[in-house]
Image (cartoon, rainbow, N blue to C red):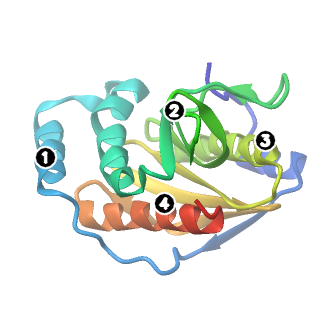
Amino acid sequence: MAFRTNQTLSDILKKYTIRYEQKALPDYKPVLAPDRLHEEIAFTVDRVYYKISESAVCENIIYPVLKEAWKPFSDSLAIWSHPTVSLNDELTGVPDYVIGKQSKLGIVVFDSPFVAVVEAKRDDFFNGWAQCVLEMYTIQQLNGDGKPVFGIVSNGDIWQIGKLDESVFVEYSSSFDIDRLNELFGALTYVLETCKRIYNL
């Protein structure tokens, strides 16, 4: 099951001694998304009631967008859908998506470092970030190197981005709308490029 918590984001930040900051996403610029993605998302928004559940948001909106943004990085990064992530009895669960190193042992191997986590939430970003920060913290501890881990929370329509850098959680002030796909695509490209650079992948 997923990382579920009755704690607020404030509770989690205090428990794990993580400082909160809010900043603008740096060095960001729109990137032209492929025509096929524009067509697929337009069709989905018009014809599919994906807001019925978090699973539907994942399948119909998040994964198609994430996969297209990831393709140029697929030699060095891998996307895992609903993998089990476990540090201890308290910090264990199944994030919606984890992005990590493409293992030299093949595509079936879930290998660290893990660089980003993506969580679908139904219009509940406050609790979504509480859950996502727990996942980011767990991944950071598993990596064991203190390097930044990115997090994304989305209800399908709106995408928000954050970063856990050592003991500082940065929530980026810009939100990205599925109706402005090139801006969203640019933000995801920035995250993936940054992960590849930071982790020398």
Query: What crowding class fits label 4: few (fewer than 14 Cα within 10 Å), some (14-19), or many (20 or more)?
Result: many
Mark 2 / mark 3, whichever is N-terminal: 2
Q: Position of residue 159 (x, y in %)?
A: 42, 53
Report whether 48 appears left or right of 161: left
Question: Which callout, 1 or 3, points to the residue nearer the camera?
Answer: 3
Are circles 4 and 2 on residues that touch, CB within 8 Å? no
Question: Which callout, 4 or 1, points to the residue nearer the camera?
Answer: 4
Give amino acid for label 3. Leu
Any mark on residue 19, and which? Answer: none
> Residue under circle 2?
96
Callout 1: SS: helix
Callout 3: SS: helix
The alpha-carbon separation of the residues under discs 1 and 2 comes to 23 Å
Question: Residue at horizontal 35%, vertical 38%?
Answer: 63
Any mark on residue 142, and which? Answer: 3
Mark 1 / mark 2, whichever is N-terminal: 1
Mark 4 / mark 1, whichever is N-terminal: 1
Q: Position of residue 135 (x, y in %)?
A: 68, 40
Question: Residue at horizontal 11%, vertical 32%?
Answer: 47
Callout 4: SS: helix
Query: What crowding class fits label 3: few (fewer than 14 Cα within 10 Å), some (14-19), or many (20 or more)?
Result: some
Front-lying residue, 66 or 107: 107
Give amino acid for label 2. Asp
> Residue under circle 1?
42
The alpha-carbon separation of the residues under discs 1 and 3 comes to 38 Å
Mark 3 / mark 4, whichever is N-terminal: 3
Any mark on residue 192, and which? Answer: 4
**In the picture shown, does residue 161 fall above or below 31?**
above
Report whether 165 appears left or right of 54: right
The alpha-carbon separation of the residues under discs 3 and 4 comes to 20 Å
